Image (cartoon, rainbow, N blue to C red):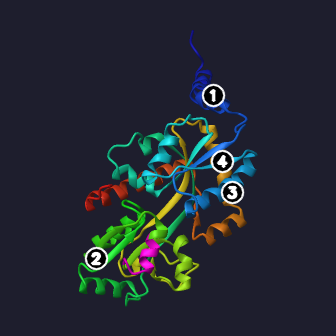
Amino acid sequence: MKFPRRLFLKLAVASAIGPTFSKAAIAPDYPTRPIKLVVPFPAGGVSDILARLIGQSLSERLDQPIIIENRPGAGTNIGTAVVAHAPADGYTILLLGTTNSINATLYEKLNFDFVRDIEPVASIARFVYFMEVAPSLPVHTVQEFIAFAKAHPQNISVGSNGIGAPSHLAGELFKQMTGIDMVHVPYPGTAQALQGLMAGQVQVMFDSTGSSIEHVRAGNIRALAVTSSKRLESLPDLPTVAESLPGFEISAMNGVGAPRGTPAAIVERLNREIASVLGDGKIQEQLFALGLLPFSSSSTELGIYVAGEVEKWGKLIKAANIKPI
């Protein structure tokens, strides 16, 4: 029997889109029970606050509780592994971030592959860093800092909230691009690192604007510049590092991921609802107050962004020969 061409094309199209319909049919009423959002950071930090802020609004839109579960440890690897090995049903999702992209190269042996095992769902926010110094340091610009560091080799320490953290890699990139020598001092967390900076235990640090802004306003630390490619609208008088060091740019992000194989219909639903949350003016104001910039994207765009981040940080980690403890 010979099929007419038009009928054959219709059958071919139906066959091609059939899997999409079957995936959507897996969870037509999603969600029907609470969703667990795993936050691989301790409670109280900017990422945790962000998760709770977005989770509350997302819960209202989905008409189901969003349960925040903090699973810190091993540089976010513990919480990420929980989601990577969870059922791909949309009821266990991850607050992912730049640290995940860094860890893909930093750690040689993990029981998951971030790019392979975590499905990109939606981006939420981006944030940049201050290049900041202890108030006792006699410098007020990036140029003055570079000159001071070159005049005092081996006497400059740069603090961070851990080996392989974005704050650490920002310092490594700065060292590479300027040729100055700085001793890296990792702290257990951001709060401890900031205390070390204020006490003069370290002389410089790269820290997110959200966690440092109040200390800068209070005069406890001095911000020399921001690490974004352009000046921030909220701080128009503060220059970028790139104005003194062309090409220097560091930013980080948070988003949502799910176990690989999560049905496309669920990914699309979550992406759509998160985008709606980010479109809320009140949510935007709260993000700005945290030093965060709303960052909405499709799941495909997030996947491309993450792949680029893995490549970028991987090159820096290998060039600086950074190893986890």
Secondary structure type for disc 1:
helix
Write down the residue under mark 1. Answer: 22
Where's the C terminus, which quadrant? bottom left
User: Residue 15, located in which quarter of the rendered image?
Assistant: top right
Which residue occupies the extreme top position in the image?
1
* Disc 2 target residue: 178
Left or right: residue 55 versus residue 127 is right
At label 4, counting other C-alpha atoms closer than 10 Å, the crowd grade (few under 14, some 14-19, many 20 or more) is some
- Mark 1 vs mark 3, foreground winner is 3
Secondary structure under the numbered disc 3 in the rendered image: helix
Q: Is residue 172 visible?
A: yes
Residue pictured at 32% horizontal, 46% vertical: 108
Where disc 2 sits, the SS reads helix
Front in this rendered view, residue 317 or 79: 79
| Res. 193 image quadrant | bottom left
Residue at 46 percent across and 75 percent down: it is 195
The disc placed on residue 67 is 4
**First along the sequence among labels 4 and 1:** 1
Residue named by callout 3: 277
Q: Which region is colored magenta?
A: 193-202
Image position, residue 140 (x, y; %) = 41, 89
Q: Mark 4 or mark 2, which is nearer the start of the sequence?
A: 4
Q: Nearer the viewer, residue 63 or 41?
A: 41
Task: Give percent across and percent down for residue 29.
Answer: 73, 35
Q: Nearer the viewer, mark 4 or mark 1?
A: 4
